[in-house]
Amino acid sequence: MTRVLHILDHSLPLHSGYTFRTRAILKSQQAAGLEVRGITGLRHEADGPDVEEADGLLFHRTSGKAEGPAGVREWREIGALASAIEELCQEWRPDILHAHSPALCGQAGLRASRRLGIPLVYEIRAFWEDAAVGNGTGRENSLKYRLTRTLENRVVAGADAVFTICNGLRDDLIGRGFDGGKIGISPNGVDLSLFGDPPARDDGLARELGLEDGPVIGFIGSFYDYEGLDDLIDAMPELQASHSGAQLLLVGGGPRDESLRQQAAASSAAGKIHFTGRVPHSEVERYYSLIDVLAYPRKASRLTDLVTPLKPLEAMAQKRLVAASNVGGHRELIEHEQTGILFPADDPSGIAGALDELIRHRGNWPAMREAAVKHVIRNHDWAQNIHRYQSVYHHLLTRGSNREISAAA
């Protein structure tokens, strides 16, 4: 039985898009007969034991603390994680190391792979230098940005195989000069076993939030600038001119929370814009039940053009209508007027116009929902998509790592 050690930035029991994708991968691989474990680096900053079970999955933690100036601190993080990987490998003896971005995890995996002779698969979920720009913690073309990109290139060059989550990331790597034959795609997906028929509308929660019967446009997630929620708020007065009952429900929180609340309070549609704050993950389905159209108005940027988000797929799997900006990451997931609608990015009036058209043609909603679910089943079901990994694992284990072949030549 093939053993795979997944090298991670953080994991369950923490909740994030990153940990949910990890959970889906590991659970699907378990169901397919692989033995899997995870190991996290020093950035998994959550209390817990050195070896922790969460949702039937086993995660090992890296102990210690990395200090020092920028650059030195990250290199020490890599060293600590690489040492932890090597120690675990001596005990558990995995057949494959599967590292997931950021490049700190990839570099630690590469170091361990070279020392132990275990093939390394490296998976890029986003370019983290671009993610830092998107969430306001980094600046494009800064020294840190360039160093992160250089480290990523080094890991991609050294790994035995590479996966990205979408064509945008793969095409960017090919544009840097990497061989496309080495780079596969493992698209964002959902564990369809978690989704059944959508729950009935929670009328009690609707009354508690002050929602009326008109169409509810909603967003559930983190409030980062690149999500474009300010454009969605600005679209509401124009949308209400056509549909007076239209309301906006924003579920979550994040860096833009306070500024968005202030913007909404100053809007002529203020009474129709509702904030819930963060809600427990176990309660999220209740909020989904209130929303007619899930909106994802991401702003145009390098990050949003290259990376496909998970949230629209989860909404489609739950038979919810999806409306999203026409950035590259959304165009890979949504076929306009078939599985959802696309509207211009950075354009509140364009958002209002697209939502107006969607609301006017309610008769098309059932067919669009059905087409969206079929699309997810066909292209984004983890139970099927994990076979992309297994074929690569088998190939690497059959031929040995590139380094072994080079040494024998």
Image: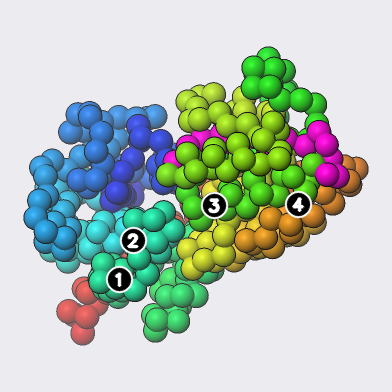
Instruction: Name the spot of residue 118 as percent of width and height, x first.
Output: 22, 61
Q: Which residues are magenta?
A: 241-254
The residue at which mark 4 appears reads as 352
Task: Identify the residue shown where x is 33% and y is 40%.
Answer: 11
Please, what is the three-letter code of the amino acid marked with disc 2? Gly
Q: Say which of 395 and 238 sits in front.
A: 238
Q: Are marks 1 and 3 in contact (CB under 8 Å)?
A: no
Q: Residue 227: which disc?
A: 3
**Residue 160: image location, x then y, percent:** 31, 69
The residue that mark 2 highlights is 138
SS category of the residue bearing label 4: helix
Mark 2 or 4, nearer chain start: 2
Mark pair 1, 3: CA separation: 23 Å
Q: CA distance from mark 4 to mark 1?
A: 36 Å
Q: Amino acid at mark 1?
A: Ser
Camera-nearest label, 3 or 4:
4
